[in-house]
Amino acid sequence: MDNKVLDNANKLINYNLNNYLYYRSMKSWTDRNGWKGFSNLLNKQAMYALKDSEIIEDYLRQLGYKVSFEKMDKINSDIEDLQDVIKSVVETEKELCKKYDKIVLKAREENNIEIEIFFKGLLANQTKVVSYIEPLELRMKRMGKKSNGLFIINSSLAKL
């Protein structure tokens, strides 16, 4: 088996760990600005990123792959408003879908059904996340930055 698939999976672990910190940074901003519902959403996304990195790490170790960790990127915390936060989440989650899809396609090319199926499962979960968050971003764009609707969304997110 070509190790490129597993190398990409290892990069995905590091990407998810970096996302964990990125989401925690945005959660901190929402906490400071009184957006508890959005904070709740970001906390969940952070925990999913951490959990996915652990799942992939365990899987790679079971395959005998030597997992390596990279130095984390500096977290950009130049957040101005909630639209920035949700836009960043959507972009990050879509990028994650692309990375999962790349691994699935490469595994399929190599006829490695086990790895393909494993990452298809993660991709399916990731697609559900995007299908939930992307319409949220659209709703927020339509409302504008100073809308009472943001408070309604905030209270609904607090119940997640």
Image (cartoon, rainbow, N blue to C red):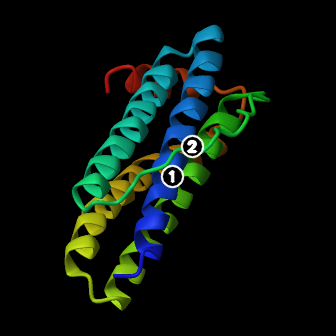
Specify the amino acid type for callout 1. Answer: Glu
- Amino acid at pointer 2: Val
Vertical position of residue 5 compared to residue 72: above or below: below
Q: Position of residue 122 (x, y in %)?
A: 30, 58
Q: Nearer the viewer, residue 41 or 18?
A: 18
| Number of the label disc, if any, that sits on residue 57 | none
Q: Residue at x 42, y 40 (%)?
A: 49
Q: Nearer the viewer, residue 51 or 31?
A: 51
The label shown at residue 89 is 2
Percent across and percent down for residue 64 are 28, 60
**Label 1 crowd bin: few (<14), some (14–19), many (20+), radius 10 Å:** many
Image coordinates of residue 148 in percent, x first then y, are 60, 23
Which element is circle 1 on?
helix
Q: In what quadrant of the picture does the N terminus appear?
A: bottom left
Residue located 45% across and 32% down the image: 46
Figure quadrant of residue 150: top right
Q: Nearer the viewer, residue 9 or 158?
A: 9
Q: Which residue occupies 35% across, 60% down?
A: 65
User: Residue 56 at what x, y percent from top left?
Assistant: 33, 52
Disc 2 and disc 1 in contact, CB within 8 angstroms: yes
Residue 93: numbered disc: 1
Relative height, residue 67 to residue 113 (above, below): above
* Number of marks present in the image shown: 2
